[in-house]
Image (cartoon, rainbow, N blue to C red):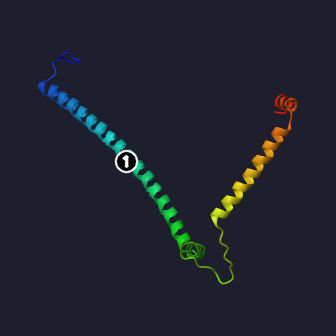
Amino acid sequence: MINRNGKPISFWVKVSLIFFVILAGFISWSIFKQTLKKREIQKEISKLQKEANKISQENELIKEKITYFKSQEYQEKEAKEKLNLKKPDENVVIVKPNIIKKELEEESEEMENVISEKIVSENNFKKWLNYFFHK
């Protein structure tokens, strides 16, 4: 090669130039790899932060549950439901589900009878009027 002055470029200058180009390429490649690693690490950090936030929320929920389980209200509720205990000034009322079920069935039968009687008592003309004008 020839430089601007018309003199040939020496061998060492060419070798040095090639060395610096290779060195610059190597440095650029290293910077690129480090940037990729940094991005991966940042993603992992954000993922771990989200997980830490989720865990801290779960911890708060657990603390609230522990506080509730230690409360007098919860203890009284459990004593009443599981141990059948009551306070001295309370009255206990027992409701049998079968009795309520029978009463509801009787009421529904009465309502069905009333509705069927009303339907039977209306004549056909009134039924058609109700069908077209009262819906």
Q: In the picture provided, is 70 more to the left or to the right than 15? A: right
Residue 29 sits in quarter: top left
- In the rendered view of the protein, which quadrant contains the C terminus? top right
Residue 105 sits in quarter: bottom right
Q: In the picture provided, is 52 more to the left or to the right than 113? A: left
Q: Percent position (x, y) of residue 95?
A: 66, 68
Q: Nearer the viewer, residue 75 or 70?
A: 75
Name the residue: 28% across, 34% down: 28
Vertical arrangement, residue 61 with respect to residue 24, above or below: below
Q: Percent position (x, y) of residue 51?
A: 43, 53
Q: Percent position (x, y) of residue 12?
A: 13, 28
Name the residue: 66% across, 59% down: 101
Name the residue: 42% across, 48% down: 46
Q: Nearer the viewer, residue 13 or 40?
A: 40
Q: In the picture provided, is 123 more to the left or to the right than 62? A: right
| SS type, badge 1 | helix
Q: Which of 85 and 116 is in front in this view?
A: 116
Q: In the picture provided, is 134 more to the left or to the right than 79? A: right
Vertical arrangement, residue 112 with respect to residue 15, above or below: below
Q: Within 10 Å of the Cα at label 1, are there few (<14), some (14-19), or many (20+) other Cα atoms?
A: few
Name the residue: 18% across, 31% down: 19
Count up the numbered dots: 1
Amino acid at circle 1: Glu
Residue located beneath label 1 in the image: 44
Q: Percent position (x, y) of residue 83?
A: 54, 76
Vertical arrangement, residue 82 with respect to residue 52, above or below: below
Q: Residue furthest bottom?
A: 88
Q: Which of 127 and 58 is in front in this view?
A: 127
